[in-house]
Amino acid sequence: MRTLFLAGNWKMNTNSVSSINLAAGLVRELAEIQNVRIAVCPPFVYLQSVSASLCGSQIELGAQNVYFQKNGAFTGEISCEMLIDCGCTYVIIGHSERRHILGETDELINLKIRAAAAAGLKPIFCVGELLEERDKGQTFDVVERQIRKGLDGISPEQAAAVTIAYEPVWAIGTGRNATPQQAQEVHECIRRLITEMYGSETAGNLTIQYGGSAKPANTAELLAEPDVDGLLVGGASLKVEDFAAMVKTAAAIKK
Ligand code: PGA
């Protein structure tokens, strides 16, 4: 039995006031929710204040990125230990904006996943193909390469703490979500790959989120798919009513 998991990726949005209002609004709206795992991932600089706003609620905190070294002369970077110190349980690693805008490689992403796993932070590991890769029929090859390289050296015990987020790059921030069937097809392949890598128990327990223009209107149909275990939500996570509506929809789904 996998518990549905919805995470809000706030990206480079909000400010010191609106981040707290957003967190407080979600705490209020979602106080009665059961059986859904919920997390929000604010910008680094608001982690501590959002953590304070979430205190006592079931909503967990995640960061959007991390560096793999523990400490030292790495100007501008943030370590796993710092994130844990600020109250984080999760960290998004390998988001397509970091891969494609900031130039992160599979190798760097692997170092980050290893560091997070060793520190006890739960990675939300993002994978997904570009539109031209999908058009050339390379979707599964791309996702398989990203997963094999990203999880290189990760033990079965560490893999159990990883969430994989399938986020087709052409669906992110475009308003054009993958159809539930397109998402299911890739999620099924991911679970098969994890079965091959780690066995059926780890694969059966693995949470695979879909991300890319997920919103209240498509939440139910995406989550109805057998291998879609949650959503990583960008734009729609910035409005209390939208993200809360998505979580409530998830809470009403029986799988
Ligand atoms: P979006 O972003 O929901 O705005 O498409 C999703 C993501 O990048 O995680």
Image: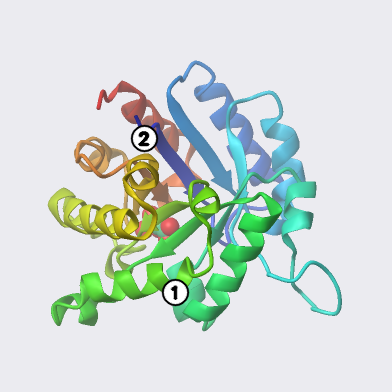
- Going from N to C along the chain, the mark reached first, 2 or 1, is 1
The residue located at (72%, 58%) in the rendering is 80
Above or below, comparing residue 249 to residue 192 in the picture: above
Left or right of 181 on screen, residue 131: right
Give amino acid for label 1. Lys
Frontmost residue, 203 versus 254:
203
Secondary structure, mark 1, is: helix
The residue located at (35%, 63%) in the rendering is 172
> Where does ligand 1 appear, by image quarter?
bottom left
Above or below, comparing residue 121 to residue 145 in the picture: above
Label 2 Cα crowd, 10 Å radius (few <14 / some 14-19 / many 20+): many
Residue at image mark 2: 246
Secondary structure, mark 2, is: helix
Frontmost residue, 221 versus 204:
204
Residue 77: x and y in percent read 74, 72
Outermost right residue? 72
Left or right of 194 on screen, residue 98: right
Label 1 Cα crowd, 10 Å radius (few <14 / some 14-19 / many 20+): some
Left or right of 111 on screen, residue 181: left
Residue 181: x and y in percent read 13, 51
Q: For residue 190, say whether it is visible.
A: yes
Residue 219: x and y in percent read 28, 39
Outermost top residue? 32
The residue located at (74%, 49%) in the rendering is 84
The quarter in which the C terminus is drawn is top left
Residue at image mark 1: 149
The residue located at (70%, 33%) in the rendering is 53
Give amino acid for label 2. Met
Q: For residue 129, say whether it is visible.
A: no
Frontmost residue, 183 versus 153:
153
Give the distance between the C-alpha atoms of the residues marked 2 and 1, in whole angstroms: 32 Å
Image marks 2 and 1: residues in contact by CB distance under 8 Å: no
